[in-house]
Amino acid sequence: MGLFSLEQDKRLLVADFVFYGVLVLALAATAAVTLPVGHVGRAAACVAAGALAWTLAEYALHRFVLHGVQPFKRWHALHHARPVALIATPTLLTAAGFGLVVLAPAWWLMPLWLASALVLGVLAGYLVYIVMHHAVHHVHSAALAPGRWQAGAAWLRGHQRRHALHHRSGAGPGACYGVSTRLWDRVFGSLV
């Protein structure tokens, strides 16, 4: 298990969460410090647009790339075969992808504060995705403390049920490709 391995150990998984958490905080600080007076609404709209863009990218990548394009399809099949194994895209590859596809073009096309806000939304969306995907596979909702966590446990159980259906059905209608949201499954008719 190395830096480019699909199967990761717990330290690399935690490093992924920490890396993206710190990056999200750094982008939030950059957006806040460089934000011109009177543009909070525009910055918030860019954060929201980035987060929405991430959810669509997450859905499209999962449905069309991870379930349709080799070698990604074969690699993703490993996750389906061993759903509790720590199989994930290495941080170096995701960071390089975000840097080339999102960060560089945004900073080239927009003022720093606006680009930072947009990228903040995308990376915050990705951070939510990796945390949720890990929770769906590794957190037992029954283990959550009763009482104040009741609603959270029910919410997690719903996500776990849909994701288990995805692992059973594989691909096609009713395959539940969305992890962080069901929005695009509803829009494209792939929600059970």
Image (tube, rainbow, N blue to C red):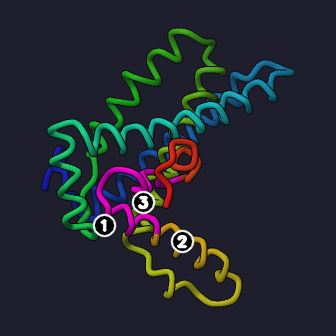
Residues at marks 3 and 1 touching, judged by CB atoms closer than 8 Å: no
Residue stretch rendered in magenta on the structure: 162-180
Residue designated by label 2: 158
Residue flagged by tag 1: what amino acid is it? Answer: Arg
* SS category of the residue bearing label 2: helix
Q: Nearer the viewer, residue 159 or 86?
A: 159
Sequence-wise first label, 3 or 1: 3
Badge 3: residue crowd in 10 Å (few <14, some 14–19, many ≥20) = some
Relative to 189, is 63 on the left or the right? left
Residue designated by label 1: 168
Sequence-wise first label, 1 or 2: 2
Q: Looking at the rendered structure, which numbered label has been put on residue 130?
A: none
Considering every residue shown, the one lying at the far bottom of the view is 146
Q: Nearer the viewer, mark 2 or mark 3?
A: 2
Sequence-wise first label, 2 or 3: 3
Distance from disc 1 to disc 2, alpha carbons, whole Å, reads: 15 Å
Q: Nearer the viewer, mark 1 or mark 2?
A: 1
Residue designated by label 3: 133
Residue flagged by tag 2: what amino acid is it? Answer: Gly
* SS category of the residue bearing label 1: helix
